[in-house]
Amino acid sequence: MSALLEISNLNVSFGAMPAVKGVNLHISAGETVAIVGESGSGKSVMALATVSLLPDGTHISGAVKFEGEDLLNAPAKALRKIRGNEISFIFQEPMTSLNPLHTIEKQMREAISLHHPMPRNAERARILELLHKVGILDAEARLPAYPHQLSGGQRQRVMIAMALANRPKLLIADEPTTALDVTIQAQILELLADIQRKDGLAILFITHDLGIVRHIADRTYVMKEGEVVEEGNTAEIFANPAHAYTRKLMDAVPDGTPEPVPENAPEVIRTENLRVWFPVQRGLLKRVVGHIKAVNKVDFFLRKGETLGIVGESGSGKTTVALAVLRLISSDGEITLLNDRIDTLTGQRLRAKRRDIQIVFQDPFGSLSPRMTVEEIVGEGLTVHKLPGDRSQLVDATLLEVGLEPSMKTRYPHEFSGGQRQRIAIARALILQPKVLVLDEPTSALDMTVQLQIIDLLRGLQKRHGLSYIFISHDLRVVRALSHKVLVMKDGDVVETGPAERTFEAPQSNYTKALLAASLR
């Protein structure tokens, strides 16, 4: 079978820095090919180079042929006809790919009219057809919606609909499921497979998740530092990986269980009847006509050195629970921290207690100020809480504890890798010597090998300091590796709670069973 896309000896460099080195790759019609590698391996750069989407000044050499036509030397007009028409892209984060100022209908109209102008009624019919095809319920009601009004899964479905608008022959999907819950991830992957079966398009799937690759790819290319180090039939690569790097990626699986907590360990935090309802107001006088019941009756307690894993799909209420516990949003019910009720505290008394409970967010690049040095970021809490001691020495000691060199403290967040930035975020929380750390999806955006490093770091910190963790994640393997107890949430309700071992080995609720079944890890 002749190749639909054929890449020969592709080299890409940014100035003197090579990003892709002599890559050869081919994909045939109807085939799914995966490119696997860690961040910085060159997989996304290689994909963008195929249709010249890299910045001006990038040096590209080699050959890229699509249906026999040379793309690297094609004129701009020819490339515009191919981009979004015969070759379409789905990117990792739809919230940054979709225009926040335009409705879903307007953005989809633009995708269609750019290549295939048609009467407005026919265009609308095509949009609705596409939205139905990707599983958007009540598609007509979604047309006037803006991206922020849709869930993560819905936004990714809209991105897929836009990518399919002009019936492409090749779909390049760059980490399209990384930030999604396991059930939504499974739905998106099944959707792509179903569309491929019906339309016969080829899919080039870029990911760092080998669990996904094993399920969807016919052939796989493994990239490291800009080079393809292994390629072949996916089943054969998984059965007999030839390269040490491939074996390293396969071995990067969170395993083990946390050390048991002594029965007499003191209680650190407890919630009773925790509830978060957001009022729905209507009319000129803004009367409350109902409530969005984000969280209903959540009860849990944590002892010193213990981890509670909170799992559930987007919108289940797990992050809302964390924000309520941190007193960042209003809630009803009791929250007790170190034997003190904090749900009634305000002002300086609340600020003083916040030193004992800190948070680490999912995206360290978004939560770290780009204008502050690492020393300023990590040491900021010392100033806020007016803590004594040599600030510089405390920052140095904390950086060492999270595996970073003190010499790095004069640098800025953009100068670090994703794993290093997450270590900085942990250091910022750790320097205040809290008793409880809330970890909101701290590993979901990281490569598998970096995930293991962060998990090992968190285990070590917990052992040394007796930290208690509230760990929020959609990655069930990570939850299992870290958690003593698990709380499963759906639509604001707790559907199951108990010891982690029992929850994973003998789940009681159908929803927990569905989450476990949907996990491709």
Image (cartoon, rainbow, N blue to C red):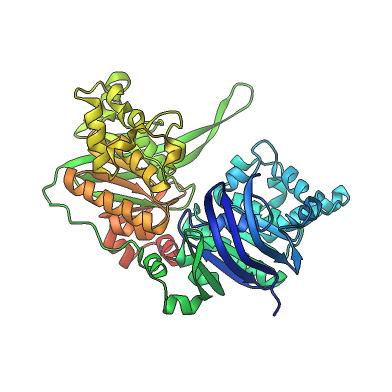
Residue 201: x percent and y percent? 69, 68
The residue shown at (30%, 36%) is 407
Does residue 128 appear left or right of residue 519 in this picture?
right
Residue 255: x percent and y percent? 30, 63
The residue shown at (33%, 34%) is 409
Residue 331: x percent and y percent? 39, 33
Point out the residue furthest to the right here.
119
Snapshot quadrant of residue 520: bottom left
Does residue 256 appear left or right of residue 450 in this picture?
left
Depth order, front residue of 294/368: 368
In the rendered image, the vertical position of residue 486 relative to residue 304, given as above or below: below
Depth order, front residue of 68/112: 68
Q: Is residue 443 visible?
A: yes
Depth order, front residue of 131/456: 456
Q: Is residue 441 visible?
A: no
Q: Name the quadrant of the C terminus.
A: bottom left
Image label count: 0
In the rendered image, the vertical position of residue 12 relative to residue 435, given as above or below: below
In the rendered image, the vertical position of residue 102 relative to residue 11, given as above or below: above
Does residue 300 appear left or right of residue 389 in this picture?
right
Residue 380: x percent and y percent? 33, 27
Does residue 326 appear left or right of residue 312 in this picture?
left
Q: Name the quadrant of the N terminus.
A: bottom right
Point out the residue furthest to the left here.
264
Depth order, front residue of 188/241: 241
The residue shown at (58%, 24%) is 286
The residue shown at (38%, 41%) is 321
